[in-house]
Amino acid sequence: MNPIEIRNLVKSYGHLIAVNNLSFDVREGEIYGLLGPNGAGKTTTLKVLMGLLDPDSGTVNVFGISSVSDPIEVKKRVGYVPEEQLLYNSLTSREILEFVASIRGLDYFHAKNRVTEMARALDFTSHYNKPIVTLSQGNKQKAMLLIAMLHAPDLLILDEPFSGLDVRTTRIMKDVIRIHTEKGGSVLLSTHIMEMAEGLCDRVGIIDEGVLVAEGTLEELRDQAESEGATLENVFLKLTGEEEEVREGVDALREALDN
Ligand SMILES: Nc1ncnc2c1ncn2[C@@H]1O[C@H](COP(=O)(O)OP(=O)(O)OP(=O)(O)O)[C@@H](O)[C@H]1O
Ligand SMILES: [Mg+2]
């Protein structure tokens, strides 16, 4: 049984079909990158997986558990870092972690040891007792990650985990993701950063207007795009049909800057 199995997922907002008959799996021990332009349906897909949105149709299973009928069981197995940072500004990270540990019914002593070690690894210890409102974007992101990993989940679902991170924190985040899979965990992440997907993901799925337009290893995607030796960025632009638009945009920009 795969950590994630999505079959024929459809999700609309009114007349807008945000996710259109999407199917893909995330296999055990792999890092799967969901790539796609703004508004492609990545966040919507991740929210359906977490049971935060009900799909119109299709099945969405996490370790064989339905995200639709059993979202609480799904949440026990998953560490989720959402796109927007949802943190109580007036609390400290420690207070939030204690709160989350209690609502998750975790043995606090065990959870605390785990978090203290992780905070050290993330170079976060000195921020642990500061109110969230005083933290920088990157440190808030670290706090979100600590919260997501508090219950030692088997699967991480990370929505744009690298946004706003500096070089060092990006590196730490990548290491956390890699170590998680080395220990047998699995990861589904969404990202716009092609180099990140290229260097980190075992497989990627490219989604455009809610439709999966390509999937595979970078090598397989190059074959599909018939772009031997191309970067993932070029493959992405070709498969989403944006190559021409980007070229026209750059030409127009060049002209505008000449005037
Ligand atoms: N709550 C909502 N109500 C109405 N439309 C929505 C809502 N949330 C998302 N949408 C629309 O659904 C589509 C998919 O949005 P989604 O946030 O899933 O895209 P995304 O791939 O995560 O984009 P980004 O890369 O910008 O984060 C977009 O057209 C978006 O405007
Ligand atoms: Mg998004």
Image: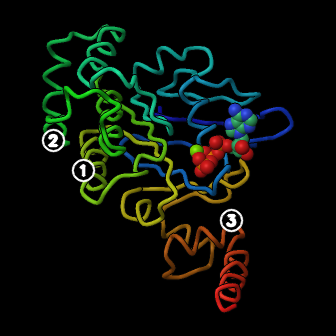
Identify the residue under disc 3. Answer: 240
Mark before the other along the chain sequence, 3 or 1: 1
User: How much space separates mark 2 and mark 1, taking CA atoms?
Assistant: 8 Å
Q: Is mark 1 within 8 Å of ligand 2?
A: no
Q: Is mark 3 within 8 Å of ligand 1?
A: no
Q: Is mark 2 within 8 Å of ligand 2?
A: no
User: How much space separates mark 3 and mark 2, taking CA atoms?
Assistant: 38 Å
Find residue 172 and name its label: 1
Q: Position of residue 242 (x, y in %)?
A: 69, 70
Instruction: Name the residue: 75% across, 28% down.
Output: 57
Q: In the rendered view, does 146 fall on the left or right side of 137?
A: left
Q: Nearer the viewer, mark 3 or mark 1?
A: 1
- State the residue in front, 180 or 136: 136
Instruction: Name the residue: 53% across, 59% down.
Output: 216
Please say whether residue 49 is visible from this viewpoint: yes
The amino acid type found where label 1 is placed reads: Ile
Q: Residue furthest front?
A: 259
Mark before the other along the chain sequence, 3 or 2: 2
User: How much space separates mark 3 and mark 1, taking CA atoms?
Assistant: 31 Å
| Circle 3 Cα neighbour tier, 10 Å, few/some/many (<14 / 14–19 / ≥20) | some
**Residues under numbered marks 3 and 2 in contact, where contact means CB atoms less than 8 Å apart:** no
| Circle 2 Cα neighbour tier, 10 Å, few/some/many (<14 / 14–19 / ≥20) | few
The amino acid type found where label 2 is placed reads: Ala
Under circle 3, the secondary element is loop
Identify the residue under disc 2. Answer: 121
Q: Nearer the viewer, mark 3 or mark 2?
A: 2
Under circle 1, the secondary element is helix
Under circle 2, the secondary element is helix
**Quadrant of the rendered structure where residue 99 is?**
top left
